Image: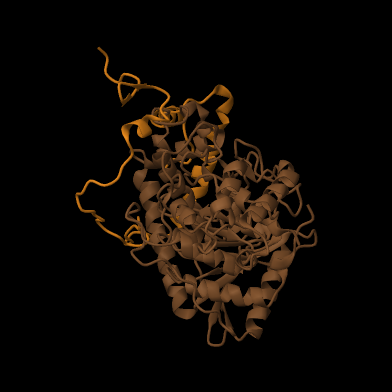
Amino acid sequence: MSKVISDQDFTHIVQLSNLEIKPEENFIKDQLSQTAEYIEVLNELDTQNVTPTFQVNHKKNVFRSDEVGESLSQDSALSQAPQSHQGYFKTKATIKK
Amino acid sequence: MNLNELNLQQARQGLKDKKFSAKDLVTACFAQIKKHDQDINAFVSTFEKEALKAAESVDISLPLGGIPIAIKDNFLTKNQLTTASSKLLDNYLPQYDATTIKKIKAAGAIIIGKTNLDAWAHGSSTETSDFGTTKNPWNKNHLPGGSSGGSAAAIAAHEAIIATGSETAGSIRQPSSWCGVVGFKPSYGRVSRYGVIAMKSSTDSPGPIAKTVDDAADLLEIMSGHDPYDATSIDEAPWKKPAPLSNLKGLKLGLPLCYFPPQIQPEVKEAILKAVDIFKKLGAEIIELSDVLDPKYSIAVYTILQRSEVSSNLARFDGIRYGHDRSFFGEEAKRRIMLGTYSLSSGYYDAYYTKAQKVRTLICQDFDKQFQKVDAFIGPVSPTTALKVGASEGQAMFGEIQDMLVEPSSIAGLPGISIPCAFDKNHLPIGLQIIAPQKREDIVYQIAKIFEDHTDYHLQKPTL
């Protein structure tokens, strides 16, 4: 486990996070390294035969019946969108023409 | 006494006896807000006109009929600004109410405003709010704690009768401790998360912040219950508070020695030990627990899991359906999203995320083991009383360290409460916490209630 987050790692994380980091925010990189170093403390504990707990009230496969219920109208769903077009949310193109 | 200074029980009785009207109550709360909230900054927004209008036609026979309530600004309120104290949502008018808000409205409560929090509930100070820091009513040079700092300050300053908070790891109990009010964190799943802006979904627990233990319990009754819109919601009828106890004979209370870390403020330790004496006098047996898993591991588990879940939950904020784009995230949110993305990324997932989930199992098992010996834990909520404004700046893990004594129980999904148990030499409040096994809010209530009945810390008021 690498304790210090490299410049390359940092650039990759920023990209995966879909964020922009201004040059004056670069100190965040060192803070991430410090935090990564702190959490190393967990390696003091042996967890070889321990199963992970993802959910504390141990619910599994919560289903509902396939019935149409009350939902937002199209107008209401679009009411907070900065841009809409013919009843749809308008997004940036994800495929080049 | 001004009407805004009443607790829930007194306000309900007064309305019933027609000593005053719901409008009088709402008016009194707004008078207090107008007088003091410029300094305290507990509220992000207030709804005076709507609240006064609602007061005119409210049915006071309902459980919370006519009672002014302050709502943490991460609960969605239909057509009323909901920001999570982030500029990214400074224009967001939700199209629906959170399940808890629906219940609170159906119970007749009147929403007077939305309270400040650390932006996205990331923090324990309210200093990361994009709308300014909330000040502690007991001393405005000090912090209220967080993330539900606005709600705790609003209750301490008597700007509302009751309030909602939400806790992921300390966000109800820690600000309640620092502001000298009662904060009741229910078991995970007891109160629906639907419509509460998601932070760390596997521990997020909405709950009440109030002036007394009974007030908090009464609001918890209203907020709780199964919700089909929240798949992790406990499949049980709404929680009902049990009858109070007249003594604690036969009850074993555990005092975890590692909840008194070396950096603890000596007055906090003394206050808890004095509370221990009160519990002994009430008949409880006190058992020192010397083998509880060190909270330092919970800090690390919480840090990994919180960041990981945040990176996923905040991915939805893309400025397409509501709010502004991702450039509006503040520094704290960016830091958390990035660490979470890192711990979930290929090559690091097992070392961080899976490892933390395994240690979570150890934390749960440790509680199970301890609860074989005792009925509940008692201890301090926070190692210190309220720190000064500015204390969190530049500290990437401020909240995690402040919340070290509440993180283990949050990670395990246990119910807990913070109640006032003393003041330090600067007259800042000290909070006592009580933690019980999962779904045992009844024990938490009974122990807290009898302590409150035998002390008067909850009756003291700050000089604003």
Tell which of B375 and B242 is nearer to you: B242
Q: Colour of chain A?
A: orange
Q: How many marks?
A: 0
Question: Looking at the picture, how far across and down is residue A34, in whole percent?
Answer: 54, 41
Q: Residue furthest top?
A: A97
Tell which of B153 and B167 is nearer to you: B153
Question: Looking at the picture, how far across and down is residue B93, in whole percent?
Answer: 48, 36
Question: Looking at the picture, how far across and down is residue A87, in whole percent?
Answer: 31, 25
Residue B171 appears in the picture as rendered = no
- Asked if residue B418 is positioned above or below residue B395 in the image, the reply reads below
Q: Residue furthest left?
A: A66
Query: How did the renderer colour the structure?
Result: by chain
Q: Which chain did the image draw in brown? A: B
Is residue A29 shown left or right of residue A62? Answer: right
Is residue B351 shown left or right of residue B428? Answer: left
Residue B212 appears in the picture as rendered = yes
- Residue B131 occupies which quadrant of the picture? top right
- Residue B155 occupies which quadrant of the picture? bottom right
Tell which of A12 and B286 is nearer to you: B286
Is residue A73 shown left or right of residue B373? Answer: left
Q: Which residue is at 67% across, 54% downward?
A: B24
Question: Looking at the picture, how far across and down is residue B207, in whole percent?
Answer: 51, 58
Image quarter hosting the N terminus of chain B: bottom right
Q: Which residue is at 57% across, 43% downward?
A: B50
